[in-house]
Amino acid sequence: MRLASERSGLALVALTLAGCGPMVGSGQGSAEGSAEGSASSEGEGASSTTTTATVDDTGSTGSTGDDGTTEPPLAGWCLHGTPLPELASSDELLAVYDADADGRDEVWMAGPVKGLEQWSRIWAYELGDGPRLTPILEVVRLGSTQAMVDIDGDGLRDLVMLEVHIPAHYWMKGLPDPSIDATPLPLMTPSTTGIWLDADGDGDADYFERVPTGLVLYLGDGAGGFVQTDTLDFGVELGSADVWPSGLPGRLLVGFQEQSFGAPSTTIWAVEVSAAGAVTMLASGSIDTVEPHHVGDIDDDMIPDVIGFDVVDNEGLSVASQSAPGSYTMQTLEIPLHGMAVGAFVSAGQLDVLHWTSSASEVSLRPREGQAWPTSIPVTVDGPWDYAGDFHPMQADGEGTLEILHRSSDGHDLWVLEPCE
């Protein structure tokens, strides 16, 4: 996710991604979502079709007035940063979500308790009257924090803990205050290092267990129990595997890398998870060394799409989407990039891209125009900008557009994109 400060002369190159790899197997597995599907050796709707698309960089540069002149659609944007010294860089970010339903996200974090290695301290922060996040909750709970997910399907995230010396998971119920109940409840997971998310779309958390060549899905029962249902067998020795929700109930994006000594190349699968936990592949392809920064259905075809950039060469604003049934095509705008954030920064419901290079003077905004982001608008940075670290779009002030929580080795800060005064 990095910068682009000019539109002219940038070529948008389409890379070809073919359907690849073995399909979802009929073994056992786990995923979170609610959609109908069945496990098979080929996957419903999957094919080996290869599609190449060519897209030029000719987006709208503005609106034309009655006198025939063209005016820029957006101009004079500033990125204002506020340091957040209360949030320690060494603490773990558990979740960013609105537990008390006041329209403002809380930032949930956890850290160790000095002198008590078996205990964890949990904080929740929310934007107050000023520009900084302030603490609204601080509790101490027994165990090591693992995740914040909705175990019981009541719409509130619960705290998953690990008893270090057993080791075994248990959970504590999230409360709307917001707070965390102190009562430990049993959690019957098959391992202690898996992926938590709602795979089948029924509202409660499910669990993917990583195995040497794939992922095993366990559906949650809403009370802390899990049932093994299906397996995603990638057919290769895994270096890594991740799963992202897409915003489509029962449809997920799975990304995996084969164990190798070279530059890691990521293969993606769009999958559907039925209410019974059967997993079906819908589309597949390679995004090479592009790192996903947004997963969602951009083109309304009910298949998860990806926005990201090449983290090896630090270039290329890339969008991977289904071009033909079963196949992904990646379209890439060849620009230098070192960082990116995707979200509704200009207006609510919009999907804008903010990107930058390693220079603080090279931050750009690209508002969405149809299915593309062709127009680059320079952004003035006001604050101690650090292009590295983790960037989390969040609804801090409850006004519809998103702010950005940034975490670096030096700490945290909150960034707001606004028209310059």
Image (spheres, rainbow, N blue to C red):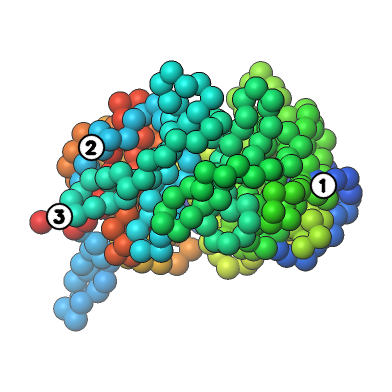
Occupied quadrant, residue 386: top left
Disc 2 packing (10 Å; few <14; some 14–19; many ≥20): some
Q: Is residue 101 above or below residue 141?
A: below
SS at circle 3: loop
- Is 152 in front, or is 83? 152
Q: Residue at x 35, y 58 (%)?
A: 104
Q: Nearer the viewer, mark 2 or mark 1?
A: 1
Q: Which mark is residue 83?
A: 2
**Kind of residue sitting beneath label 2:** Pro
The location of residue 102, given as percent across then percent down, is 36, 64
Q: Circle 1 sits on which residue? A: 228
- Name which residue type carries label 1: Gln
* N-term-proximal mark, 2 vs 3: 2
Of residue 184 and residue 300, the one placed in the foreground of this image is 184
Q: State which quadrant residue 186 falls in.
A: top right
Q: Which mark is residue 346?
A: none
Amino acid on which the number 3 mark rests in the picture: Cys
Along the viewing direction, whichever of 189 and 217 lies nearer the viewer: 189
Query: Secondary structure beneath disc 1?
Result: strand
